Image: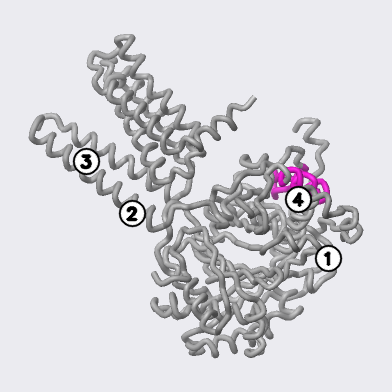
Amino acid sequence: MSKEENKLSWRRLDNSAKIFPISAGKKYSTVFRLSVVLKEVVNPKILEQAVNVALEKYKSFKVRMKPGFFWYYFEENNKKPIIEKEKAYPCKYIEPKSNNNYLFKVTYFDKKINIDIFHSLTDGGSGTIFFREIIYTYLELLHPEVFDEKERQIRKIEYDTEDSYIKNYDKKAKGNASTKKAYILKGKKISLGAVSAIHEIIDLKALKEECEKQNATVTQYLSAVLIYAIYKQNYEKNISNKPIKLCIPVNLKKYFQSKTMSNFFSYITLEAEIKKDKLDTFEKILEFVKSDFKQKLTEKEIIKTMSANVKLGNNPFIKIVPLVIKKALVRLSYIEIRKYTTITFSNIGRIGIIGKYRNYIDYFLMLIAPEPVEKIKCSGCTFENNMVFTFTSILKDNSIEKEFYNFLTEKGIKIKIESNGVLNDISTKN
Amino acid sequence: MIYPQKISAKKSDFIIKISIFVSFLIALILLIINKSVTPKIPWAALANSGIIYIWVTVLYAINKNVNIAGHVLVQTIAISLLTVYIDYRIGFKAWSLAIAIPIVIIIANLTMLILTIVSHRKYIRYAIYQLIIVLFSMLPVIFISKKLVTDPTLGEIATIISIFNLLLTLLISAKDVKEAIVRKFHL
């Protein structure tokens, strides 16, 4: 190691982050994307300036990843990130060399700015904080006559990079993981490594009214619609006794005091026993979802899941295994682990934008990378009166997306569709 | 529109199916010509195994989403060196220069051409490798000019195919090629 490299600061990966670089690759990118659709065409030069300014404020993103003997670690990155026009499919594996070894990639297209983030770096919640900083700075640089950066800085909260998992986990908590394998979505995959992105831009007011009628939260209601769409369009056509298992990431900052910009999330897994519990109508599925949420979305249950994962990462026997061997073992075991989830739905909720900045934004998008086993992944985010529900898929058949759309529109909820055109338009008959 | 225009899954499937059908047709025609014109020399089998090799490589690239151009380049150089070595060890009749290397070059160029047609949006990833393959494809010209080969036919065909390949890919991906050259060779 050169003297210059020695001077660079470094930090450990948080407990969740440790697993991602070991298991990730071209097939399993573990990348998520946040996008903002602005009301005017993006200026690339200003965007580049904005990213560099934001990086100086959020140093936890100004890093590259290096392999240690036992674990990967983050090291300060003094190069500048490369900002490019969007060309590739969303959430693809970020080739370190393609962006001066940064673990995120900012791209733009027409009125849209994207940030693809490798999950080791942070989770959706903290990713949003950094992305918002880029957007605020971009708008301030573009319209200096309208915005005053100093005014915004007064309201800024200080963040750190602590491993909040280690600080908050319960050493005595017992694991609660289900031992049942999940129903895996069937169907042919899209060729050429393409990824389909379909965004259903839902009228939030109408959706909330429908949720209120059903006495459910937005996440519960959409989870039920998703399970129902899978049941109607995929499960029913293939004979299976396995449950449809829906993984829902949970932001732990809602449960614990934390200002970390690192990962701090856990998850709950809804286990819909379609055959055993005869969940063959939407009403029955919704009742099941509400009751499973009530049972699993409690601080006690969340601590159990989180603690089990922390204990695994802290296990002294796992710690002392060299990284090369860890990689091989984790990749082998992940072939099995991935069979325990049918689909993931990550809802990061409302993206809060302050004051006049709102006038320049149309809506936000969130996307997560599909994988060879979990062929469809879903995500959601809200801005003003738009709730954008996104399907990222590697399946040729888009009937689940279509069923989801038809179900909501039949309830009188207005939906606008945007997509990257890989699959057929779902809002017309085809 | 919030995304750059992407080739639809239906279209890309159609292109692959048509290309496989055309390859099959070419293989069949070669076999018929071989049987009826020169039945004693089984050259069509060699050509058809080349076609199979191309498709194995292309389908691998598509399914694994790897930068296959790099692999094609490495394989082209490695197989060429290997054939020269074998030729040298068994008495150097120059078949490696007259037959083997030109065939390897033809296959490499056709593989790159198919990859460019079915996924030209990714051309930027292939551009530099493509240029090196074209440079490597000029080797038969050197062999012919230095009179290292007695029968220059295959060498000439290989050179013509590689020039045609370069022109066609430039035509298909002119914008991307320009961007790749500017990025890689900026001062």
Which circle marks residue A258 in the picture? 1
Give the Cα distance between marks 1 and 4. Answer: 27 Å
Q: Secondary structure at mark 3?
A: helix
Task: Say which of marks 1 and 3 sits in front.
Answer: 3
Circles 3 and 2 on the same chain: yes
Q: Secondary structure at mark 1?
A: loop
**Is A235 placed above or below B120 here?**
below
Q: Residue at x 59, y 32 (%)?
A: B183
Type of amino acid at the residue the image marks with label 4: Tyr
Magenta-highlighted residues: A47-76
Please name the residue that numbered disc 4 is placed on: A138
Q: Residue at x 75, y 43 (%)?
A: A49
Task: Say which of marks 4 and 3 sits in front.
Answer: 4
Percent x, y of residue B14: 33, 54
Question: Few, some or many C-alpha atoms within 10 Å of disc 2 (few <14, some 14-19, many ≥20)?
Answer: few
In the foreground, A133 or A322: A133
Circles 1 and 2 on the same chain: no
Please name the residue that numbered disc 2 is placed on: B14
Which circle marks residue B26 in the picture? 3
A82 left or right of A339 in image? right
